[in-house]
């Protein structure tokens, strides 16, 4: 122990204890320092490095730190020089209250290897508080008949300092009637009693004012004073007398409200009201006592008023006065009551985790220290004795070190792949009756090595994206999981390069490397790209890194973003299409057909037709699904020769898109009547003459090749039928079946194709007609040669009857563009057979050419 008269910051006491054989190597010793309170920040306490024999250069690397249960970090260690210094000013009265001894318990923890040192810092009291009275003006009533030698207790002053710095004595101002007697309580505190030295005479002086001064024993001396006003009362011969001047009683803490503590008994020799006694607390009784206890004014019973806690105060001392009812001048008697509070086991132990090494490597050796634990119990005696145990289902054990300190260490090898995290429950139980216990659960993680590759939640992904999506829109989100932990499970996502329509996939799609969200970099067009595939890589950040891939199929969904396009009839002069109708046409006669297409698919390409306006709505109607325009009745003499129709073509999308076509029908008696008009029309449209000429040549070539192919195939098939012995009396009459079509170069410029449905059970007298356009993919039709083919050099086709036709295997009700063109061509040629005959006779003049051009344009 170091002593001397050096300044306080340099004064210290060092006491090193040699470790006992029962302690583990973890505990190296204990140091004790002594410092005064109220030191400023940075004040020197001691050199921990020198006193413990530590290498100053390794303090920082070994992570030296202080662990304390105090509410504030009062002390700290300079890791550069090992000096323990004051981190925050210490108020001993606030830290320890009225306790004579005040210690600050610290623990120094050092790692690599793990070591623990205990430090006790004794906080010495300084005389920084002056004595004070609860009230500055005190009042005392004394009857004038009081005999000399009568003693009157005075209110005690309060000084939060302890020892010699607390109250040493009391003084009273000089006077001729009173002296002061200073007494010592059982706890060595001082109190004063006023002693009557000379009898009082109320008629001479009614009030005596005295100055009561409390003086402490500190250096320098501090004092506090109060004014005592002695009021002299008149006439009372006898005062109450207690059986005992001091009453001592024991009371268990947490006693229920109303519990009887003590019954007082005082007597008075007077009679009547002068002998009737009332009990009450002395006016100098501390407020805390009045909060905890009550006294019955008639019976003198002292009972519990509120919860009493031994850990707060273990004994109470107060005065009870007995006063008779002999008037306002009755003299009270006083007795002292000492209540000792007995401790009960009402506080459970507290488990404090001092240090924890988490996570721990799964290959940690048996016996590796995981945590340091300390336990406390504020109860006393056996109620504060604690035992610690650990749960049995974990590969760890707990070992006692010293003074309610324990070490948690591994007891078995660890395997993270079986258990990655442990909840270790430590149970601290005291020895009281009944015993109380506290559970502390420590969550310990086991660190991992990178031995697992990421795994995607699905073997592959198929996502659907509506076309015309905004760039940057989320396409999908892929998720991969890695059973490893920490950085071994941190995943980053990327897209592997591959070509999509000649461009790298990174120009189409991007991915958030952190969360796997896939974004579109461009707006997709279903009409250009219907689906594509990307490959996503998930890679962890372990060493070495592991990865896996997954395929994502992106399917583009169609959106109704294309307006129907009317292919036929085409308008003349960009306004309306011109058509001719014989005035002798029958009701239901097919006079024209709207052929339209839509670049969309599905319901977005399903077209419907509606007649919006007409010169005479009773003459024509339009088929909703086919667009065929037919007469509803025969033409009359009063019907105008010009009939204008406005037809709406609308798809079935949401919201639907539409287009309109305007057709002007010229009702003629004979076909030659319209030739001059058509010729004039041709002369008025010189700008489009070249385009019309080429169109006539193309359509004429197509018709010629188509007819030749039909005739050749029909002849071959009929010959095969005869050779195979088929019945010539077919129910289809002269209809020759078309089964095979081996001329792929014939219709290069057309989307119409002829094919035979495989394994078909329909009669072999039919031909499948379909197309390769957007609309033609929905339907296939059965056609056969018409009876008119035998009467003309042209071969005509018509749809077979429902009994012999077979619908295509595509969904939708809208006829294909190619079949509509074929059917329209068939109808127009059938109805204008005399035009074709004129072509056969090579009657080609300007008007005939115009007629043919108009025919095929329609």
Image (cartoon, grey):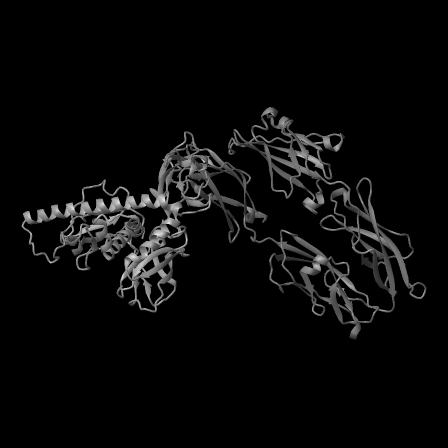
Asked whether the viewer can see residue 396, the reply is: yes
239 in relation to 430, above or below:
below
Q: Residue 27: where, in percent of width, then height? A: 54, 32
Query: Outermost residue, bottom direction?
Result: 272
Does 816 sit left or right of 408 as displayed? left
Q: Quadrant of the N terminus?
A: top right
Depth check: give the residue in front, 261 or 227.
227
Depth check: give the residue in front, 689 or 528.
689
Q: Residue 358: where, in percent of width, then height? A: 49, 37
Residue at 80 percent across and 46 percent down: it is 130
Residue at 76 percent across and 65 percent down: it is 322
Depth check: give the residue in front, 850 or 157.
850
Depth check: give the residue in front, 138 or 617.
617
User: Toward which corner of the image does residue 13 lie, by quadrant?
Assistant: top right
251 in relation to 712, above or below:
below
Q: Residue 374: where, in percent of width, then height? A: 54, 41
Residue at 41 percent across and 41 percent down: it is 394
Counting every numbered tag in the picture gives: 0
User: Toward which corner of the image does residue 226 lie, by quadrant?
Assistant: bottom right
Q: Residue 705: where, in percent of width, then height? A: 22, 44
Asked whether the viewer can see residue 538, the reply is: no
């Amino acid at each position: 122990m170091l002593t001397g008269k050096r300044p306080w910051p340099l004064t210290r006491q060092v006491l090193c204890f040699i470790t006992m054989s029962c302690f583990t190597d973890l505990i190296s010793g204990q140091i004790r320092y002594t410092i005064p309170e109220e030191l400023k920040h940075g004040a020197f306490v001691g050199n921990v490095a020198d006193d413990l024999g530590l290498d100053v250069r390794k303090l920082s690397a070994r992570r030296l730190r202080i662990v304390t249960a105090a509410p504030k970090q009062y002390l700290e260690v300079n890791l550069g020089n090992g000096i323990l210094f004051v981190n925050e000013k210490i108020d001993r009265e606030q830290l320890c209250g009225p306790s004579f001894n005040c210690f600050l318990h610290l623990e120094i923890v050092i790692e690599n290897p793990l070591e623990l040192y205990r430090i006790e810092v004794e906080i010495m009291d300084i005389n920084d508080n002056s004595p004070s009275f609860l009230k500055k003006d005190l009042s005392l009533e004394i009857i004038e008949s009081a005999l000399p030698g009568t003693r009157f207790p005075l209110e005690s002053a309060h000084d939060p300092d302890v020892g010699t710095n607390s109250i040493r004595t009391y003084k009273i101002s000089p006077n001729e009637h009173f002296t002061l007697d200073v007494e010592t309580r059982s706890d060595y505190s001082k109190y004063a009693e006023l002693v009557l030295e000379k009898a009082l005479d109320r008629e001479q002086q009614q009030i005596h004012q005295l100055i009561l001064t409390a003086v402490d024993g500190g250096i320098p001396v501090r004092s506090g004073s109060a004014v005592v006003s002695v009021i002299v009362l008149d006439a009372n011969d006898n005062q109450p007398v207690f059986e005992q001047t001091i009453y001592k009683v024991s009371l268990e803490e947490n006693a229920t409200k109303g519990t009887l503590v003590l019954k007082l008994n005082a007597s008075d020799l007077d009679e009547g009201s002068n002998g009737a006694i009332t009990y009450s607390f002395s006016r100098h009784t501390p407020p805390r006592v009045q909060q905890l206890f009550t006294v019955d004014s008639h019976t003198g019973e002292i009972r519990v008023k509120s919860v009493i806690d031994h850990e707060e105060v273990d004994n109470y001392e107060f005065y009870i006065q007995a006063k008779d009812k002999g008037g306002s001048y009755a003299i009270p008697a006083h007795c002292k009551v000492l209540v000792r509070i007995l401790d009960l086991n009402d506080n459970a132990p507290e488990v404090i985790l001092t240090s924890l090494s988490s996570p721990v490597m799964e290959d940690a050796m048996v016996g590796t220290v995981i945590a340091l634990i300390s336990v406390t119990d504020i109860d006393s005696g056996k109620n504060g004795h604690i035992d610690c145990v650990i749960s049995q289902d974990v590969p760890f054990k707990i070992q006692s070190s010293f003074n309610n300190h324990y070490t948690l260490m591994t007891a078995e090898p660890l395997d993270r792949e079986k258990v990655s995290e442990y909840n270790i429950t430590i149970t601290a139980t005291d020895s009281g009756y009944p015993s109380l216990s506290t559970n502390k659960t420590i969550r310990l993680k086991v660190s991992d090595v990178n031995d697992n590759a990421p795994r995607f939640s699905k073997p592959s992904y198929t996502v659907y994206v509506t076309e015309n999506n905004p760039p940057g829109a989320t396409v999908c989100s892929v998720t991969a999981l890695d059973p490893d932990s920490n950085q071994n499970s941190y995943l980053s996502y990327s897209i592997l390069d591959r070509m999509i329509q000649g461009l790298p996939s990174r120009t189409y799609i991007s991915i958030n490397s952190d969360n796997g969200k896939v974004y579109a970099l461009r707006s997709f067009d279903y009409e250009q790209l219907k689906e594509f595939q990307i490959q996503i890589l998930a890679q962890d950040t372990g060493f070495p890194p592991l990865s896996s891939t997954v395929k994502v199929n992106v399917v583009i969904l169609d959106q109704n973003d294309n307006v129907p396009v009317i292919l036929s009839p085409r308008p003349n002069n960009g306004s309306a299409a011109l058509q001719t109708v014989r005035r002798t046409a029958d009701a239901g006669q097919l006079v024209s057909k709207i052929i339209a297409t839509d670049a969309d698919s599905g319901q977005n390409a399903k077209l419907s037709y509606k007649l919006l306006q007409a010169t005479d709505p009773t003459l024509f109607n339009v088929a909703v699904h086919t667009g065929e325009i037919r007469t509803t009745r025969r033409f009359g003499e009063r019907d105008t020769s010009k009939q204008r129709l406005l037809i709406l073509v609308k798809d079935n999308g949401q919201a639907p898109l539409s287009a309109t076509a305007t057709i002007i029908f010229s009702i003629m008696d004979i076909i030659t009547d319209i030739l001059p008009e058509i010729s004039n029309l041709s002369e008025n449209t010189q700008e489009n003459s070249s385009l019309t000429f080429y169109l006539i040549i193309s359509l004429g070539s197509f018709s010629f090749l188509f007819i030749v192919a039909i005739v050749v195939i029909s002849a071959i098939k009929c010959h095969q039928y005869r050779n195979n012995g088929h019945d010539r009396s077919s129910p289809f009459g002269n209809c020759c079946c078309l089964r095979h079509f081996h001329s792929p170069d014939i219709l290069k410029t057309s989307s119409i194709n002829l094919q035979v449905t495989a394994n078909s059970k329909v009669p072999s007298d039919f031909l499948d007609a379909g197309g390769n356009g957007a609309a033609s993919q929905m339907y296939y039709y059965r056609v056969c040669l018409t009876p008119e083919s035998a009467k003309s050099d042209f071969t005509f086709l018509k749809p077979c009857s429902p009994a012999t036709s077979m619908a295509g295997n595509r969904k939708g009700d809208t006829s294909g563009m190619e079949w509509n063109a074929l059917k329209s061509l068939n109808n127009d040629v059938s109805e204008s057979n005399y035009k074709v005959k004129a072509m056969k006779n090579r009657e080609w003049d300007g008007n005939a050419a115009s007629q043919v051009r108009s025919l095929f344009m329609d």
